[in-house]
Amino acid sequence: DAGVIQSPRHEVTEMGQEVTLRCKPISGHNSLFWYRQTMMRGLELLIYFNNNVPIDDSGMPEDRFSAKMPNASFSTLKIQPSEPRDSAVYFCASSLSYRLQPQHFGDGTRLSIL
Amino acid sequence: RKEVEQDPGPFNVPEGATVAFNCTYSNSASQSFFWYRQDCRKEPKLLMSVYSSGNEDGRFTAQLNRASQYISLLIRDSKLSDSATYLCVVNQAGTALIFGKGTTLSVSS
């Protein structure tokens, strides 16, 4: 069975550039989550969607971050302009429901902003 | 008080040892509880759900104490392959999962 698929696996870019991370959730899952993980802050929830609708984006650090889910099988997280402090591993996860159900994670995107 | 708190460790144990991790949560309305495992440079993976009556999966036993608002994970007969970070995860109705920062386990031969 296909799990959550993220791309790219690694991204290295210079500060000021636009970065777009992509995620394909598990088929049939109604909820999708974007996380950021660093050593200092651990796993932080940025935003999550239910049935393609954003439910809570209070974790998005600032206006430079935006996320979309145009359909049930695709989501993007965009950073524009990127800054060195955005360097982290970004995970996408999906679940049958954001209420009470476990989440399944993709392999993550390792982002380095120089 | 943080919503989900764990002792970061590291816990260093020899092979064959029994080790236990605890996790406390702040919201008494929490309804679902999980343990996730994360290997170095990998994604978190669901290890097991935690049920009110306690549950076991092979060498792993999870317990829930609602009155004291803590969850535990017991690992018996530790293997080298158990070395990882264990994340305590709590869910409240109407919100997404809340992850603890994790407890690091290192099993040595």
Image (spheres, rainbow, N blue to C red):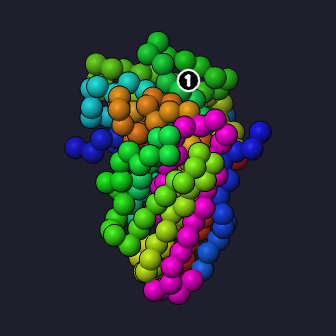
Give the residue type that dot 1 points to.
Answer: Thr
- Residue B40 shows in the view: no
The residue where tag 1 is placed is: B61
Image height check: is B93 above or below B41? above
How would you rate the neighbour count of disc 1 (Cα within 10 Å): few for under 14, some for 14-19, many for 20 or more?
Answer: some
Q: Given the current orientation, which residue lies at the most extreme top position?
A: B53
Image coords of residue B54 (percent x, y): 49, 16
Magenta includes A57?
A: no
The reply, left or right, for residue B32 in relation to residue B39 is left
In depth, the one of A69 and A61 nearer the eye is A69
The residue drawn where x is 65% and y is 58% is: A6
The residue drawn where x is 61% and y is 53% is: A74
In depth, the one of A55 and B29 nearer the eye is A55
- For the N terminus of chain A, the image quarter is top right
Q: Given the current orientation, which residue lies at the most extreme left position?
A: B1
The residue drawn where x is 59% and y is 37% is: A29
Image coords of residue A20 (percent x, y): 55, 70
The residue drawn where x is 65% and y is 42% is: A26
Q: Is mark 1 on a helix, strand or loop?
A: strand
Image height check: is B53 above or below A7? above
Q: Given the current orientation, which residue lies at the most extreme right position?
A: A1
Image coords of residue A45 (percent x, y): 41, 52
Chain where mark 1 sits: B
Task: Give the residues in magenta.
Answer: A13-38
- Residue A68 shows in the view: yes
In depth, the one of A80 and B46 nearer the eye is A80
Image coords of residue B75 (percent x, y): 58, 31
Q: How many marks?
A: 1
The reply, left or right, for residue A4 in relation to residue A40 is right
The reply, left or right, for residue A26 in relation to residue B30 is right
